[in-house]
Every structure is written in C-alpha cells, then in structure tokens.
Amino acid sequence: MSKKITLAVLLSGSGTNLQAIINSINNGKLQADIKIVISNNKNAFGLERAKQCGLKNLCIDDQAFKDRETYDKKLIQIISKENVDFIVLAGFMRILGSNFVKRFPNKILNIHPSLLPKYPGLNTHRKVLDNKDKEHGVTVHLVDEGLDSGPIIGFMKLDVSEGENESELESRIHKLEHFIYPKILSQLQEGRVLIDDSKIKIDEIFYENGKEYFN
Ligand code: GRF
C-alpha cells in the first residue's frame, strides 16, 4: 500500500468539498492527512469545519495585503513549511499568481463546476441554463497561471433536467464534486495518476484532456 498523501486545503466559503475529503479520510477511502486548512476569508464556514475536526486552520485575510504578490508570498511561506504533497483548492476565490504556481509545479489541484474548457470563471450554472445546455458537470484539473485552464485530471457529467432551476442544478453538481474530488485524490495517493507536464496518465493510459475518464 502506498504511503498517505499530505494536503493543504485552501478555501473561501462553505467548505463542503473539504468536508467530503475529511469524510473520505475518516471512512478509510482516502489515505491522506490534511496538514492545514487556509482561508482568505475569516467568515468562511470551511474554517469552522476544520476546527470541529481538529485540523490546523488559519485565515490569511487578503484585505490585509497590499497586492497579490505580497499575499501569495505569505501563502508560499506558510504552505512550504507544511511540506505537503498537494495543495487542494476547494472553493478558493482568489487567482494564484505566477510565483505561487511556479513554486508548486504539478501540485496544485482545483475543482471547477463546469465541463472545462467550457465556462471558466463564475456563475457556471446560470450560464448552462441560459444557453440551454443539455449537459453540465464538474472538472478537476491542475492549476496553471490561467483562469481554470490547467491540464484536466478528471470530470463527471450530468444531464440537465427539463425545468431544473439554478439551485437544483447546483446541488446536483455539488454531489458530483463530493464524489470526484476525494476519488481523484485517492487515485493520486495510489500512484494511479501520473502527472507529466501537461499529460496526465491514469492507469497506464495517457489522457490529455480528461476525455473517457469518469464519463
Ligand atoms: C464548488 O462549487 C467548487 O467547484 C468551486 O467552489 C465551490 C466550493 O464549494 N470551485 P464548497 O465551499 O466546497 O461548498
């Protein structure tokens, strides 16, 4: 059995994805240790979840920093000390600058509520409904310097139901997120996902854009 992976989780809000990762660890499905949970927002409920689970947690309030570079420098300093295998963005509502991304190559993961490369950025459920898309989904990808644009590790799709509203869609998307994020972390822990530049190798097969995986 491969050794546990260590994680830093960064969030800004409710932290349901953090909770899904914690639950997977607690029920033995994911062999990982969360070394630290960091939020840029002191009111993030995700920090409370971390506290309740006895995890080290910290708010680095972005309001207190003059620019992105200084903020990212502080983040780098704190995360470097934890020496983690992966930095897991779980609803972290800040773009990480190039210094940060370069400091942790192939180690930063993000989950995004759309079938990337469609709909990077905010309000993805609204956009899906406005455009009358038939399908929607979630994507887990490596973070590069663009907005939701790094190499895709995996995705899951759902069919948009007739008459479905934004909050119903959001809640179904959340269920997919809570399944796929711990699952991919577990595959990384088992050494089944190999990351080589922009190529992702899963179970001995190379996928350059996530197609065929979790389809
Ligand atoms: C999720 O929808 C995730 O895809 C996006 O931010 C949201 C975070 O939700 N990046 P939560 O805080 O984990 O509940």
Image (cartoon, rainbow, N blue to C red):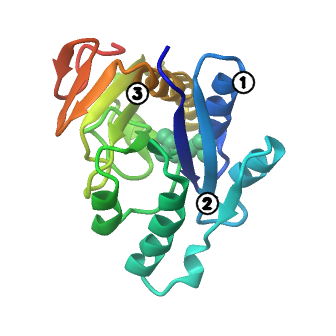
In the rendered image, residue 213, in percent from the top left (x then y), is placed at 30, 15
Quadrant field for ligand 1: top right
For the residue marked with disc 3, what is the amino acid? Gly
Q: Earlier in the sequence, mark 2 or mark 1?
A: 1
- Circles 2 and 3: CB distance less than 8 Å? no
Q: Relative to residue 31, is residue 104 drawn left or right? A: left
Mark with earlier residue (2, 3)? 2
Q: Disc 2 and disc 3: Cα gap in Å?
A: 25 Å
Report the mark closest to the observer, 2 or 3. 2
Residue where numbered disc 2 is placed: 39
Q: How many marks?
A: 3
Say which amino acid is labelled 2: Ser
Q: Is mark 3 within 8 Å of ligand 1?
A: no
The spot of residue 9 in percent (x, y) is: 56, 47
Give percent across and percent down for residue 209. Answer: 20, 28
Residue 147 drawn above or below residue 156: below
Q: Residue at x 60, y 16 (%)?
A: 29
Q: Where on the picture, by quarter, is residue 19?
A: top right
* Distance between the alpha carbons at the discs numbered 2 and 1: 22 Å
Residue type for callout 1: Asn
Where residue 129 appears, as percent x and y from the top left, is 42, 35
The residue that appears at 47% across and 19% down in the rendered structure is: 2
SS class, disc 3 = strand
Please name the residue that numbered disc 3 is placed on: 137
Relative to 200, 87 lies left or right: right
